[in-house]
Amino acid sequence: MYPSFLPPLVNQLTELDAIRLAQQLQQVAIATPLQTNPILTNFVQQGSGDQDILLIHGFDSSVLEYRYLLPKLAQQHPVWAVDLLSFGFTERPEQLPFTPETIKTHLCQFWQQQINRPVVIVGASMGGAVALEFALSYPDAVKQIVLLDSAGLAPKPLSRFAMVPPLDRWATQFLGSMNIRRKICQSAYFDKTKVTTDAVLCGAMHVQCDRWQEALIQFTKGGGYGSFYPKLKQIQQPTLILWGEQDRILGTKAAHRFQQGLPNSTLHWIPNCGHLPHVEQTTLVVEHILRFCQTLIPITSNH
């Protein structure tokens, strides 16, 4: 049985990993200073132990992108994945601004109310920018950082100023098309054979959620996350940078810039991999993360 809050598209899943994770999704009412009513927040938790891992998804995505990574990490650690405010299957309250600041506040409240001990925070793509901002704002909550083909170095795009009616609605309707979602997957994946029906469904299911379009328009108009480069030197936590060698979304230069800007970081390239190493090369990514979790001593980079 699937949770009742999931859209009808969930019934089209056929791959066991996707089905299992979707069946385990939960919603919890998270109280925040953002509004009077708590926010129904989607998350999944597996595993047990002393070292918690918190997974943060990318732009216009959901926890389902961790359908392969999460259960493997959970064999050795307690692992959490949460849908950020305005994304995934988390509630999108009316009258609430969807900005990096509100996303950070909501994430902090989720961490306090559900985990409340230092985590290894793992961020993929835009989730990497979220992880960096979280570590900068709440350093005591973050023990280590893992960046998977992370955003967070580019300035806010000028294209956000073009998001005016009716262009904003046309643009988001475009992103809601299953054919467009498939094309996005084909750009993100190195191995095109992995662009399965389930891969597309996991990347698109949340577009059927209430107020998906309105929230995406509002977040995009704000420009999302800008460049963290000047602030990277403030981050002292050990940071593992994992990057697909064939990333066509962000390219590969950003990986070196992150490694140069973060004072205690190491960079590992993931071969035969595009923008989604946790999806395309899950086993190798798991090995890197588990090894990283075993040590808190300073680490050196490999180039």
Image (spheres, rainbow, N blue to C red):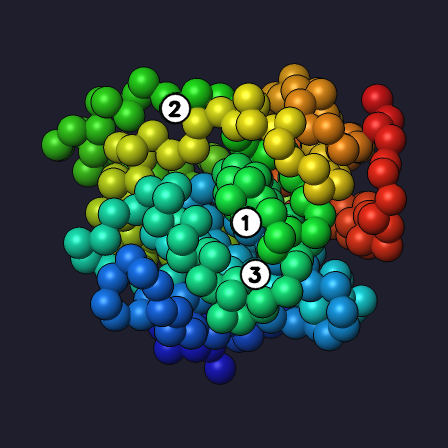
**Identity of the residue drawn at 73% across and 74% down:** 48
Tell me the SS state at disc 2.
loop
- As displayed, is residue 83 above or below residue 25? above
Pointer 3 or 2: first along the chain: 3
Q: CA distance from mark 3 to mark 2?
A: 26 Å
Residue at horizontal 58 percent and vertical 44 percent from the top = 135
Which residue appears at 35% of the width and 63% of the height?
Answer: 32
The answer to whether 233 appears left or right of 61 in the picture is right
- Mark 1 to mark 3: distance in Å? 18 Å
Type of amino acid at the residue the image marks with label 3? Ala
Cα distance in 3D space between marks 1 and 2: 23 Å
Q: Which residue is mark 1?
A: 138
Residue 273 sits in quarter: top right
Q: Is residue 71 visible?
A: no
Q: Which residue is mark 2?
A: 156
Identify which amino acid the numbered label 2 is placed on. Lys
The quadrant the C terminus occupies is top right
Report the amino acid beneath label 1.
Tyr
Give the foreground label among 1 and 2: 1
Q: Is 224 in front, or is 273? A: 224
Q: Residues within 10 Å of mark 2 (few under 14, many from 20)?
A: some
Residue bearing the label numbered 3: 81
